[in-house]
Amino acid sequence: MTSAYQQLEAIFSRLHHFSHLASIAGWDQHTMMPAKGNEARSAALAELSVLMHQIVTTSHVDQLIAEAKNETLDAWQQANIREMHRSYQSTVVLPEKLVEAKSLAGARCEHAWRQQRVENNWQGFTKSFKEVVSLSREEAQIRADATGKSCYDALLDLYEPGINSSDLDRIFGDVKQWLPSLLQNAIEKQSQLSIPPITGTFTVEKQRQLSQKVMKLLGFDFDAGRMDVSVHPFCGGVPEDVRITTRYNEDNFLSALMGIIHETGHARYEQNLPRQWLGQPIAHARSTAIHESQSLLFEMQLARGDAFLTLLQPLIIETFGSQPAFDTAHFPYHYRHVKAGLIRIDADEVSYPAHVILRYEIEKQLIEGAIEIEHIPELWDDKMNHYLGVSTQGNYRDGCMQDIHWTDGSFGYFPTYTLGAMYAAQLFNAAHRAIPDLDGKIASGDLSPLFVWLHQNIWQHGSSLDTNALITKATGETLNSRYFQQHLQQRYL
């Protein structure tokens, strides 16, 4: 007789297969699909999301979970049941029609955004964005009623379970105390340097060749993934078939390169999740902030450090030729140049938290009904002036329309970037304590000790541990933002 637990495994394995199809169809929608295919693809993906919702809500999952909890299960199976229960509770509260409507609205808004952003067309964008916000508020209220959380916290919990906006206000409030002076001091210190600029045109083909070399250096498995181009860089797919994307600028190869390193960090995590549990909730990444900690550990902690730049410098000269900016004395500066700019994904690691805090503060007010869509541009400009001293007045393209996250209703996602940066600093500090002469090994081209440490402490655990337990196991303590502050002070001051 098939046990309740075995029946649950079969149900969630089926969900994983459908999720696989949805991920690849979504990747194609963002990369290869012709524009006129969007309506049909959006309808197909909405139908698939409804089907997955029906599988959870009509399979007596709640009854099976209750029965399985009384069965003899090992520690991993018990953790898997816990994650199944969390997934079930998250799914069952939403009505089927809302799931379908949100999927359709998000796909249409994102597709329209691609051209509207190029045109700086805020008014046109708001027509489809209003529906996304309305449906997201409806979802937030339903989740809030079911959980007793605030509307925003109910959405935040989808990305970062165990944390709430009160925690974020405290953590980000501390950052706002020390970040402005650190940012200003770093800019002032660098202004005294005389550094030759990077010059020339960097063809897409040469950038692609360089990117692939760096991805191989970072251990990306090209037999289990690929890299392509999209309007907004992302990492998608499934652990068995990870898809990452970038966008190239022939005047500035650094943007695409560091973006690819960032996405490769995501990909390495996905490719190293516990293989024996793939298809089960326990094999998922622990949370969005932990996912971001891996991409930001690769991009910020590792790739902008002196040891890794020692490896990167000859690859860049081999690809693009030599120039004064690539000399050893000047090269690191271009990866650690601090500037208060407009674009989040191109921001340095000192100014980056300001971009995240700005978005968090706006989206929280938007979901909770304290502001409406019409207020966003002015509020965005005010906060950009306050936090970074730059204006976006009238510049929607490089202001409130620059990101893709809100187009599909991913409210609650943005805070995980800075939480991830904090986890990354804490993890890299712990790796240095655990691995003798880690920087020397990296500089010599041997990155395997770092990857083994990450596999042992983060990757192989999937969702078997909650976030606090995972970070405590890896570093000896729960999240401590002081490691992030100390890292920035050491590197830039």
Image (tube, rainbow, N blue to C red):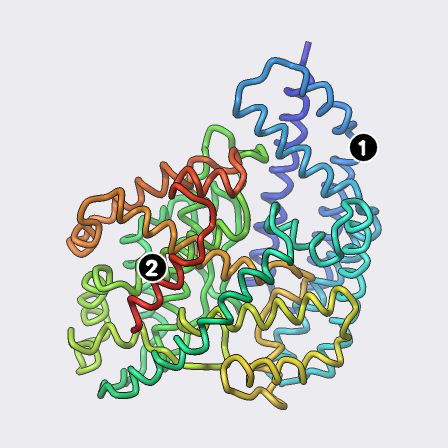
| Dot 1 crowding, Cα within 10 Å, few <14, some 14–19, many 20+ | few
Q: Quadrant of residue 10?
A: top right
Tell which of 144 and 259 is nearer to you. 144
Tell me which amino acid carries mark 2. Answer: Gln
In the displayed structure image, the side of residue 73 where residue 337 appears, left or right: left
In what element is the residue under mark 1?
loop
Q: Residue at x 67, y 39 (%)?
A: 87
On-image quarter of the N terminus = top right
Q: Residue 259 location, x and y as percent?
A: 41, 65
Residue at (39% x, 75% y) in the render: 182
**Which one is in front, 125 or 90?**
90
Across the whole image, how many numbered discs are drawn on residues?
A: 2
Mark 2 secondary-structure assignment = helix
Instruction: Report the residue marked by disc 1.
Output: 58
Residue 224 higher or lower than 354, as above or below = above
Residue at (83, 47) in percent of width and height: 95
Q: Nearer the viewer, residue 424 or 77?
A: 424
Mark earlier in primary sequence (2, 1): 1
Between circles 2 and 1, the one closer to the viewer is 2
Give the CA distance from mark 2 to mark 1.
46 Å
Q: Amino acid at mark 1?
A: Thr
| The C terminus, quarter of image | bottom left
Residue occupying image coordinates x 41% and y 71%: 350
Q: Which residue is mark 2?
A: 301
Q: Residues within 10 Å of mark 2 (few under 14, many from 20)?
A: many
User: What x and y, as percent, mark residue 9?
Assistant: 63, 26
Q: Is residue 318 left or right of residue 87?
A: left
